[in-house]
Structure formats: structure tokens, C-alpha cells
Amino acid sequence: MSSDSEAAGRLIDKGKGRARSPDPTERTPLLGSTSGSYTSSVDPGRPPLTRRLYSRLLTVFLASLSLCVLALLLLIVIIFSYRARAVSASPDEILQHALVVRGPDRVDVLNTTGDGGIWMMIHGRVGFDAGHVAGVNTAEEDGFIEDAWKAIGRWGIRRLDKVSVNLSTITVVPEGDSGHALTTISLPQLELSLTANPPSDSSWLTPVAIPVLIRPTKDAKTLMRFVHQSWKDGTIRVQASVDQAIVTGGGLTDAGSWRRRIRVSHHDIQTAVHISIPRLPGLPHPGDDLPEASQFVKLDSFLIKSSNDTLTISANATLMNPLESFINATVPSLPFIVYLPPNGTSPPVPLAHVQSPPFAFSYGNISLALAGVVLPLPRNASGLLSEFLGAYVSAHDADILLETTLLPDVRVATKFPAPHPPPQILRDVKIKDMKVKPVGQGMVASGIVHARVVLPPGIEVGVDVVRVFPDLLVYDGEVPESTAHERLEPEFKVFNFPLDDSDRDVPPQPPLPDPLPERAFAHIRPDDWLPALSVQGEQGPGEGTVVNVTASIVEVPLEVLPGREREFSNFVSKVVFGTQGALAGLQGEAAVAVHVDGLPFENGRDGEMQLTGLPFKGNVRIGKRSMLDGSLMD
């Protein structure tokens, strides 16, 4: 009955729903058709299986999302925490503890800009300890949580990998004197590798080669004052300032990367730099007197020659670099200008232009071969050039100034070494065919002066001696030793053609020695210059240019010295009554006027040099027959 009722119930259901499959019977297949629908009976007290699955998936998704959001928020907190530390880090802390620089290992001077700038390539090693700035370097006292926290920061530094640094011009001034800049330094945009937990050695540093433009000050007084003060203190104290420094994440080639969004800037950066001056071998201890530039530059030899209407210069010099292992620079060919220093109202005068070959600026003595020319001299250079040459032939080191394009308008005082012993320029003075005769109340002498003019070694210029002026004492016998070694100070006078009449004035007459030398009885001094002829002579060892000079003496007064009439009479008696005649000693000083081949002046004419105060001495034997004939023979 019940089954009939159920069947009737199923027949009465005529809705539009999908038809249900009849209940299985004994003949129903175990596997239904795949095309048919099947709905199992579900307990109305339990949720469907799909609903439970969706619920579980939703729970997992929400939990995962929450964890991701939490991790993201934690990562943002960590990033902003480390970024805040990086931004708040002072430039001094970064420079002192984070930025590690070793070197320079090598410096190449590339070229000069012509307006005082110097391009250099600086080779060194650089590292940036970003872990110190962000505070994520490991420490022994770190706990598990803190170490994990720092590990995330170190991971972020490794991901960032590099930063780009753009600095404005760096200005360097003496500490405490911001009004006088020593130099400015311009750098290109730099790329720095970031490191966390660097080792204690230098193995983590990255080799770099950075082009640098340096513009030293043109204020020589400020520079020299700073050098003297630094040496006196034993410490170089400077203040470096940068208007702006911008640090951007990523390297120079990371355009468009997420790293470029990280950007930190600092303004008005100032930091003090103190460098102790080390004890340098061969130099005074820092704090003592500053060594002169001549201790660093030594002129070993030089050669000045006349060539093609100019004077060429070649020289060998030694440059001493006392800074061991501090710098190893390759310096290109550099021009130098040699100046004569100012004297009173006379400004410095450029004397010569020389060029150095490229050389390695390393520790120790550096040999340089220089070559150049003597520059055209202005007319007002005569006084300074005269002083320079006069000091040189008097065996006094002459003052000069050196300037290079590396430091324009900065002139370093040094010495031009003089020869030792003093050069004897006038040699082998003789008087031949000399005639003595009375004129009025006195006596006059005539004859021919023969001499050799020998320039110091290293000066091989064309010389034409055009005039001479002797001033000498005559002795009865050889010149006494007590006076033979007395030396007068030679003096130079340099003139530029055309000469005025005053330029040809005879040298001033020096006073007679007081007391008069022993056995000196006569004084010979002409009233005017004596015209001279010169021919090239044979150059001996250790000699420069040699010329043989002759000049005629025509009736020059022979003045008997005051109170020496008896000595004069005794000498005449020896000549007249002696079988061998008498030996007369000659001692005095002479002046010569020369033309130098190629000596340049601004007006294009050769100049004339007058060298006065040249000492000489010699002996002449006078025979009886010569005296009677009125002649005095060798």
C-alpha cells in the first residue's frame, strides 16, 4: 500500500522541474548512463559539500591575505625604519665610519684646461658600509628577534646593491678661514657598491678610477701662508664643504628600475679634515723652519747655446719627492717659466720657457731632462738680468722664480746654482809691444793687450768682444800673495740697442787700495773704452765659449802711485842696470763689452752686455834695451 501511495505521489508531481530518475530496482544497472543526472539524498541537517569547501578556501585565503598584509606592513615598517636611519645619519658619521677610501694608488695627470684647471685620473679603492648606516650589521649581543630583524635589512641592502652619488663642487678652505679657498674639486656622478657586514680587511673594497677636475687658487699669498702654517703646526687642517649631495638607489645604468625611486639628499655639508704631516727623510721635522723649494729641485747641469738667432736651453734637473708610498702619479709634459724675481719697483721678468718630458712622480729622486729657449727680454729687464748674471759669475746662487701651468700665478722661489769655485772669466792677460815715454810732467804707455775671455761651463754662446777697459796696478816683481787672492765682485750691465752715450760711459774708478799693496808703484787706467777684436778660441775641459781678445793701448797715462816714487826709481834702475832686466807684476780688474749671438730682446735687436770688475793678474819682464828703445817686451 505504501508503495502504491509513493508511486501515486510521483505521478501527481507534474512540475516543470527536471525529471528525476526512478528508484533503482533489481533490474537497474549498477552504472548509470553518463548522460543522465543524478541527485543523492542529502541530510537536511548538514551543509552541502561545496559550501563547506568554499568556506574552507575562503578561510585560507583570508588568513593568507592577512599574513601577506601583515608581512607587507612589517616590511614597510622595516624599510621606513632603515630609510629613516639612513636619512638621519649625519654626513660626518657617513664620511668617518661608512665611506671607506684607500689610496690614491695612482694618479694620472691627464691635461690642463688653460685657465688653471687640472684634470686628473685618481685610482683607488672605495667601499660603502651601508649596514653601519642602516644599523643592520651583526653584533655579538644580538638576540634571535633582533638578528632576524637585521637580516631583513641586510637582504634589502643586497637587493639595492648600488647607489649613485651626485655631488656639487667641493670647496676646500683653511680651517677657520672660510674666506680664502685653497682649491675647488669637481667630480662626475659616482656609483658606489653597498656592503653590509664587511670584513675587517680591505678585500671588500672596489677598485675605481675617477676623473677629477681640480682648480687650485690663484692667490699665491694664501697658498704659501697655508703651507707655512701647516708645516709649523705639523698638521694639514682644512674644511671641505658641499652645497648639495644627492644619493639615488641603483647604479648609473639602472634607469627605470624600482631602485631609482629611493632618493636621499643632503644640503650644506661641511666636514673637517686633519692630516698629520709625517716625518720626511732629508727634511726638517714638521714644526721647524719650512724647507726651501731649492731642497726639492736641484739643477744638475745646463747648456745654453746660440742657435738660429735664439738662445736654446737644455738642462738636467733632479726633483725630490719625499712622500714614500703616498702618491704614484704619471705627469704629462709640462711647461715651466723661469722668472727673475722683482727688485724694488721692478716687476718679475720672464727669462726662459722650458718643457719637461712626461715622467712618473714616484718616491725618491726623479730625473728630468728640460729643454726650452730664452724669452725676448723687455728693455726694463736690463737691471734684473745684470744682477742675475753678476751674482752667477761671483759664485753666488742667483734667486729665480718657477711657475708651471699646473699652478698659474703661483711662483715658487728657488736658486740657480752658481759654479764653485768662482769662474775666472778673464785669463792670460798680457801686454805686448808696450812703449813708455815722458809727456810733460808725466809718462804715458802704449802697447797691445792680449787676453782670453772664458765663459763658465755650460754657456756655449756666440760672443763678440767689442770693447775692453783695463784698470791695473804695476808691481816691482811678482804680485804679493797677500793681495793675489783678493777678489773683487764682478758686475754685469745689460743693454738693448741702440745704446745711449751714457751706456758707453767708462766704469767708475774704484778707490786705490788703502794701504797700498807692497811693492806696487804705478797705476794704468785709460780715459775711454779700448776698441777690441775677438776670434774664437780653443775650448778646454771645463770651459764654455772661449774667445781670444786683443786691444791697443795708445798713450795711456802711467801714474806713479803717491809715495811710491822710490819704488818706481828702483824698478827703473833694475831695468837699466840689470843683466836680465826686471820682472813687473800686473794686477787689477777689467771690463768687457760683448754682443751675444741670439740674445733676444722685444725689439728684435741683439743686446750688449758689459761685465765689469773682472779680476786678473800676470807678469811681464822688461829688458834694458826695451827701456832704451822705449819698448816693453814679454
Image (cartoon, rainbow, N blue to C red):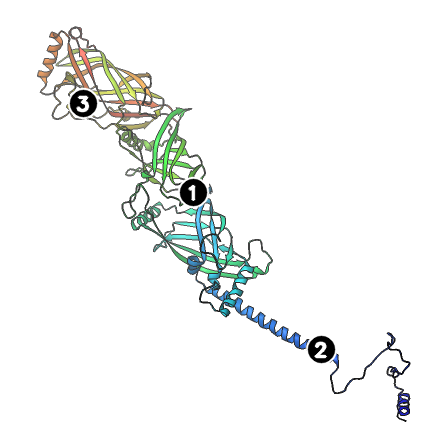
Residue 529 visible in the snapshot: no
Element class at badge 1? loop
State the image coordinates of residue 446 (x, y, percent, origin top left).
21, 13
The crowding category of the residue bearing disc 1, from other C-alpha atoms within 10 Å (few below 14, some 14 to 19, many at least 20), is: some
Mark toward the start of the polypeptide (3 vs 1): 1
Mark toward the start of the polypeptide (2 vs 1): 2
State the image coordinates of residue 525 (x, y, percent, origin top left).
20, 19
The amino acid marked with disc number 2 is Tyr
In the image, 77: left or right of 182? right
| Residue depicted at 49% across the width and 59% down the height | 196
Q: Quadrant of the C terminus?
A: top left
Element class at badge 3? helix
Say which residue label 3 marks.
484
Mark 3 to mark 1 CA distance (whole Å): 54 Å
Residue 589 or residue 485, whichever sits in front: 485
**Residue 457, placed above or below residue 139:** above
Mark toward the start of the polypeptide (3 vs 2): 2
Query: Which disc, if any, is residue 328?
Result: 1
